[in-house]
């Protein structure tokens, strides 16, 4: 099932997406939580959403609106660095023995077709196509064997990164280089975990102005989603609606010769098999 958040004339609402149409879930189930994060947190919420989608489609309860980030204001935006063997190599780093973890602030999250805004103080802004896992069950100290049961679904992500801040500032400003406003596009929707039988067997690509810059597969992940959840939850309680950017494959702009950095007028497209296409234009920020 594809679940999305859209903006309508009556406010934001959660919909199911089928054949390009948005199915209203609120009319078939008025007590369903009004946000996708709320649905994930509700016991049996995804099953109720699926039942509402079936009833809504049968009754022709379709709505129109503009796609937003599927998870609005996630509690945590957890990111993993150097998690593809080839990307570690192109970055001049050995494969890490443990996951490299950092974070972004929730206000960095935007949805499809929303612009990535280049801050005036950032001059080397890069793209990073990523598989994003969405947490659906609360947990801490989650065993690896149980970790995937805590995943509600998956979506595309773009870990936009200001390399000059991340790598060239004194002490390396990883946080500020990764978390400017709009630097975490996600979407276009969440695909529930039951429709992604193997998160380690997905083609992943990024196109910049129509040219393929990254083209790989999640088989190249060093640490899978289950390992990441087990590792992070050793010290952090994961909550429904938390999102985990799982790392990027090779082909990033900073590793190219000459380097390729984002500029006003560019368009980034992230495509992962079965998850749709996440498209974002690039504009000048303030």
Image (cartoon, grey):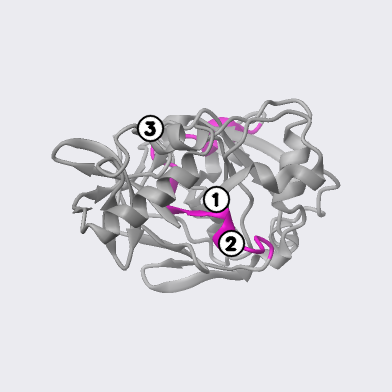
> Which x, y percent locates residue 67?
29, 50
Classed neighbour count for the residue bearing mark 3: other residues with Cα under 10 Å, few (<14), some (14–19), many (≥20) = some
Residue at the spot of label 3: 33
Residue at the spot of label 2: 196
Tags 1 and 2 in contact by the CB under 8 Å rule? yes
Classed neighbour count for the residue bearing mark 1: other residues with Cα under 10 Å, few (<14), some (14–19), many (≥20) = many
Which of 107/209 is in front? 107
> Relative to 226, is 113 on the left or the right?
left
> Relative to 151, is 120 on the left or the right?
left
> Magenta part of the protein: which range?
172-200
Residue at (81%, 54%) from the top-left corner?
95
Residue projecting furthest to the right: 97
Q: Is residue 50 above or below residue 103?
A: below
Tags 3 and 1 in contact by the CB under 8 Å rule? no
Q: Which mark is first along the chain, 2 or 1?
A: 1
Residue at (34%, 32%) from the top-left corner?
31
Classed neighbour count for the residue bearing mark 2: other residues with Cα under 10 Å, few (<14), some (14–19), many (≥20) = some
Q: Which mark is first along the chain, 2 or 3?
A: 3
Q: CA distance from mark 3 to mark 2?
A: 24 Å
Q: SS class of the residue under badge 3?
A: loop
Q: Is residue 133 visible?
A: no
In the rendered image, residue 69 lying in the magenta stretch gets the answer no
Q: Which mark is first along the chain, 1 or 3?
A: 3
Q: Nearer the viewer, mark 3 or mark 2?
A: 3
Q: CA distance from mark 1 to mark 2?
A: 8 Å
Q: Which mark is residue 153?
A: 1
> Which x, y percent locates residue 83?
71, 53
């Amino acid at each position: 099932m594809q679940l999305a958040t859209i903006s309508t004339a009556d406010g934001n609402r959660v919909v199911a997406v089928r054949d390009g149409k948005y199915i209203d879930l609120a009319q078939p189930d008025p007590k369903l939580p009004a946000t996708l994060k709320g649905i994930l947190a509700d016991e049996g919420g995804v099953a109720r959403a699926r039942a509402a989608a079936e009833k809504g489609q049968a009754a022709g309860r379709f709505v129109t609106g503009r796609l937003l980030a599927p998870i609005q204001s996630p509690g945590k935006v957890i990111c993993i660095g150097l998690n593809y063997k080839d990307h570690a190599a192109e970055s001049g780093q050995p494969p890490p023995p443990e996951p490299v973890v950092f974070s972004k602030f929730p206000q960095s999250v935007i949805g499809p077709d929303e612009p990535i805004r280049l801050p005036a103080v950032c001059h080397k802004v890069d793209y990073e196509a990523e598989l994003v896992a969405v947490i659906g069950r609360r947990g801490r100290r989650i065993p690896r064997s149980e970790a995937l049961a805590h995943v509600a679904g998956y979506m595309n992500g773009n870990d936009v990164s200001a390399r000059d801040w991340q790598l060239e500032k004194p002490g390396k400003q990883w946080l500020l280089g990764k978390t400017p406003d709009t630097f975490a596009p996600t979407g276009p929707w969440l695909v529930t975990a039951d429709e992604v039988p193997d998160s380690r067997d997905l083609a992943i690509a990024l196109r910049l102005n129509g040219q393929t810059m990254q083209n790989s597969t999640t088989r190249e992940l060093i640490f899978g989603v289950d390992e990441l959840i087990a590792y992070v939850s050793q010290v952090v309680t994961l909550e429904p609606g938390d999102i985990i950017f799982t790392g990027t494959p090779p082909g990033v702009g900073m590793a190219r010769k000459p380097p390729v950095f984002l500029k006003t007028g560019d368009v980034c497209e992230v495509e992962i098999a079965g998850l749709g296409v996440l498209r974002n234009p690039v504009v000048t920020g303030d």
